[in-house]
Amino acid sequence: MTLTLPPAPHDETGAGRHLVDAARWPDVARLPPASALRTSIARRIVERAFRRLPLRVRTGGATAPLPHQPQGGAARLPVLTLRDPDAFHRRIGADGLIGFGEAYMAGEWDSDDLVEVLTVLAGHVDELVPGPLRGLRRAWVRRRPPSDLNTVEGARENIHRHYDLSNDLFATFLDPTLTYSSAVFASLPADAGDLPAAQHRKIDRLLDLAGTGPGTSLVEIGTGWGELAIRAALRGARVHTVTLSREQRELALRRIADAGVADRVTVELCDYRRLEGTYDAVVSVEMIEAVGAAYWPAYFGAVRRLLAPGGRAALQAITMPHEQVLNTARTHTWISKYVFPGGLIPSREAIARESAAAGLRVVHDTGYGDHYAETLRLWREEFVRRSAEVTALGFDHAFLRMWELYLAYSEAGFRSGYLDVRQVVLTGGERPGEDAR
């Protein structure tokens, strides 16, 4: 089943840019300055790439196909519709993939199957730009702004910009556990009714990997809305969990009290770098992506410092190929601009290197990216179904399209294999002989 938000209301050009609130979305409401040369080059690159990809491209209206179709195929191909081709190519000429995302927010392109189009693009990411032109990449991309650095103050602001949007917003598409990370399903494909049990299965696996049981002292880096802390406390653990999101902390405290474990869980508004003490177990779920490469040594150093002798750290982390980490570490992307400021997805190599430098050893490493693709599909479909509720919370159409693109873009990353998600166990080296898989 494919669910997609309705396209933005269009003006005579076929786009909805004139309806975008310029105060909230200034770079979406107006076209960027771009030279005719850059726009022309971008058009040639895009049209060349589209001709080689297994998708159909339509321009103007929804019924006028461009002759950019691969040979020999009666199979159904996803359709990308250019509602304002001139604006689309101008944005890409000026800002590359940031422009691609802003063009979607402005309604300058649409798709009958957004995830499939993005999966095609993600699966052919290395082929989109001709080899001789890849060396010019730096001329097309923007560097991350200094304000995105995850200093102690910067991290607080970056977390606020995503996680403090509204607890009610996240509740529209997450399952009742309010777990905002990949689930582990009993079987695939899954349906929405499977999601709460799949989230508990994921949490329980991490707690098992960390050796959590009665009397375990556990610190969690990144509280979320408290579900992992609750399940750890129900096992008899004593939990100290930290977050930088005030909204998440307030709701987590209520949920922990409602679960009857407030006497065993402390929720602190605290940066992980300022944590003190030692613990039998450290657990951190999809938090390293918000740290930034400059602070990976501080993150793994904190994990090592907090881990008592013989203790175990269980991390869940999204990963991408190491070459892409190197390409994007300093690049300002659409995701870093609009969704996760200051964030960077690590590679397995980066995790292994940075953890080893901190005196930690990887003793377990398993991935299940196909489960994240299913998790994101369920979130996206629920978000689209309840888009009227999101609008009632005060979020406009540009936000709806931004969030749909974010969820679809992420799902496509996992479906194409460009992204993975892994559960990793680290020790301080006190447990020789364990297998690293």
Image (cartoon, rainbow, N blue to C red):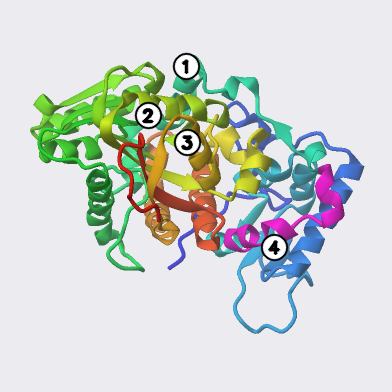
Residue farthest to the front, as pictured: 432
Dot placed on the residue nearer the N-terminal end, 2 or 1: 1
Residue 120 badge: none
Looking at the rendering, which quadrant does residue 127 occupy? bottom right
Report which residue position mark 3 lands on.
Answer: 356
Please say if the residues under marks 4 and 2 sit with CB atoms less than 8 Å apart. Answer: no
Task: Please identify, in this view, whether the residue under mark 4 or under mark 2 is nearer the observer.
Answer: 2
Whole-number angstrom distance, CA of label 1 to CA of label 3: 24 Å
Dot placed on the residue nearer the N-terminal end, 3 or 2: 2
* Residues packed near mark 4 inside 10 Å, few (<14), some (14 to 19) or many (20 plus): few
Dot placed on the residue nearer the N-terminal end, 1 or 3: 1
> Residue 166, percent across and down?
37, 31
Dot placed on the residue nearer the N-terminal end, 1 or 4: 4
> Residue 320, percent across and down?
55, 49
Above or below 328: residue 89: below
Dot placed on the residue nearer the N-terminal end, 3 or 4: 4
Residue 61 badge: 4
Name the residue at 44% across, 51% down: 421
- Number of numbered discs visible in the structure rendering: 4
Q: Main secondary structure of the magenta part?
A: helix
Report which residue position mark 2 lands on.
Answer: 303
Residue 152 in sight from this viewpoint: yes
Q: What amino acid is found at the position of numbered circle 2 in the picture?
A: Val
Say whether residue 123 is magenta: yes
Name the residue at 75% across, 80% down: 71
Answer left or right for 28 relative to 199.
Answer: right
Task: Please identify, in this view, whether the residue under mark 2 or under mark 1 is nearer the observer.
Answer: 2
